[in-house]
Amino acid sequence: MFPFMTGEDGVVRVNDNDLTQYANILMVDNTRVGFSHTLDPTYMVTDYDMLAEELYAALTQFFLLFPDVKRSVYIGGTSAAAFKIPPLGEMILRRNRTVVDLSGVIIGDGFVDLETDVSKVGDYMYNFGLIEKAVARNTSNTLEALHATSKAGNSELTTYYFIAGISDEINKRIGFKNMDQQDIMQAFRFHDHWLDFIELPEIRAKLHVGQLPYTVIYGPAEKFFGIYLGKRPRDRLEYILNKRIPLLKYHGQYDGILTYQSSIATLYNLDWYGQNCLRTKQFRRSQVWVSGQLFGYIRRCFGLWEVLAIQSPHVVQLKKPKALWLMAYRFMKNTTSQGSAPHGFDSHRGRNLF
């Protein structure tokens, strides 16, 4: 995503596939870490509202400090980070958009509604031949329990069913020793050379972390991010969509954590003004070609762009960064002025040429 990256030899090099070629990027880390690190438990984030307040404060202060870069803002998150985006977007819209001009939301392989986000994972793994039919059936039973706890508002038990009843159960039954869903589907893993790099004394000094090990997890904060995984940021995303804020939702074909079929189930369950369009011919797939290569497929209805990146794992940018960033750039360029179709879109040929 950024202009520089580390290689296996620990040397920092220029990244030719970074997103900064197409847009100005502001990376906001988890609250109360890095330069804002604190051991005071009263400063730990413990709910969605506090999370949104922290992120909103960071954005507003940034634009007050650097008014020369004030322009259309797109907020985005990948995987578990995606559930932070709807609360932030909702707060921006309810507060002062003259300070933060929210123009769009980008969610990649991300949690929106845990109940539907994992609804097809058992069938997905079974169809790939990775688990037995009985395991897939047991997963379906667990999903029914997850549905019941979600409806009852028990977010802690909902999260438990997801982690212990679905992910852990599949990992135990997947049939490959020391491998789990992410390994099988080519998904995200921290690179050893990157961990080695940030553990260097001079790097730790620049990060101002002192002797604090990176493995330290504050209990209440960990519990928050676990329990709130079972809550529903979906309602907040519906609010954003109904305020006519465009959404780009992309997904990797080989994502075995949040399967594509589950992601589509989530979209169909959203209550927003364009819902009926999703069941019409307008919401049909067309190809996306980037630099002469087929990147994937796109479907569009009103402000929603839904993209499937072929042969890509969980966290698409690790496999196809340049193509994805071009896709994101096209989304931003067209929706800033609320354009009706991406440049290069040909409805007769059904192709998007970027």
Image: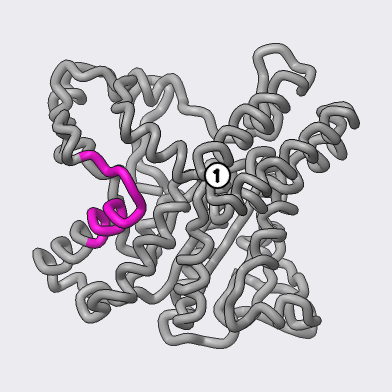
Q: Looking at the picture, which amino acid does disc 1 mark? A: Val
In this rendered view, identify the residue nearer to me: 47 or 307: 47
Q: Is residue 127 magenta?
A: no
Give the farthest residue toward the front. 152
- x, y percent for residue 72: 32, 75
Residue drawn at 22 percent across, 81 percent down: 98
Above or below 200: residue 114: below
- x, y percent for residue 144: 74, 44
Residue drawn at 65 percent across, 13 percent down: 178
Residue bearing mark 1: 315
Provide the secondary structure element on which disc 1 rests. Answer: loop
Above or below 61: residue 217: above
Q: Quadrant of residue 58?
A: bottom left
Please give left or right for residue 299 compared with residue 21 in the image.
Answer: right
Tell me the chief SS of the magenta region.
Answer: helix
Please give left or right for residue 71 compared with residue 315 in the image.
Answer: left
- x, y percent for residue 186: 65, 33
Give the farthest residue toward the left. 65
Please give left or right for residue 90 compared with residue 176 in the image.
Answer: left
Residue drawn at 23 percent across, 37 percent down: 33
Quadrant where the C terminus is found in the figure = bottom right
In this rendered view, identify the residue nearer to me: 278 or 3: 278
How many discs appear? 1
The answer to whether residue 183 is visible is: no
Q: Quadrant of residue 131?
A: top right
Q: Quadrant of residue 340?
A: bottom right
Colouring scheme applied when the structure was drawn: one colour
Above or below 294: residue 127: above
Residue drawn at 62 percent across, 79 percent down: 344
Above or below 273: residue 77: above
In this rendered view, identify the residue nearer to me: 238 or 189: 238
- In the image, the segment drawn in magenta is 44-56
